[in-house]
């Protein structure tokens, strides 16, 4: 965490969050563009991973 005393860092520690959940917590607690971040995460999670083979 860059700012371990921030609202999102505190919440992440309490929830033992990792990965995408960290971004969700940041968007919810501190971002002024939470809607954009949530939409981007939804798109990311719905997009199938392409194999490189």
Image (cartoon, rainbow, N blue to C red):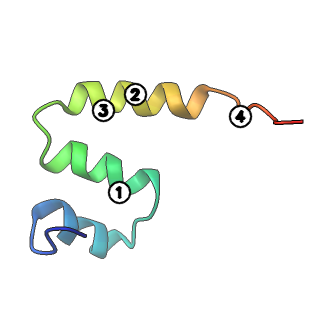
Please give the residue where the numbered disc 4 appears in the rendered image.
Answer: 49
Q: Is residue 53 left or right of residue 42?
A: right
Query: Mark 3 and mark 2: span between their CA atoms?
Result: 5 Å
Q: Helix, strand or loop at disc 4? A: loop
Query: Mark 3 and mark 1: span between their CA atoms?
Result: 12 Å
Q: Helix, strand or loop at disc 3? A: helix
Disc 4 versus disc 3: nearer the observer: 4
What residue lies at 29% left-to-right and 67% top-to-bottom?
12
Please give the residue where the numbered disc 1 appears in the rendered image.
Answer: 22
Label 3 close to label 2 by CB (< 8 Å):
yes
Q: Earlier in the sequence, mark 1 or mark 2?
A: 1
Q: Earlier in the sequence, mark 2 or mark 4?
A: 2
Please give the residue where the numbered disc 2 appears in the rendered image.
Answer: 40
Q: Earlier in the sequence, mark 4 or mark 3?
A: 3
Please give the residue where the numbered disc 3 appears in the rendered image.
Answer: 37
What residue lies at 70% left-to-right and 29% top-to-bottom?
48
Q: Helix, strand or loop at disc 1? A: helix
Number of marks drawn: 4
């Amino acid at each position: 965490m860059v700012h371990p005393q921030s609202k999102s860092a505190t919440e992440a520690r309490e929830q033992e969050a990792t990965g995408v959940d960290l971004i969700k917590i940041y968007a919810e607690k501190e971002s002024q563009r939470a809607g954009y971040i949530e939409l981007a995460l939804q798109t990311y999670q719905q997009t199938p991973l392409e194999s490189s083979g």
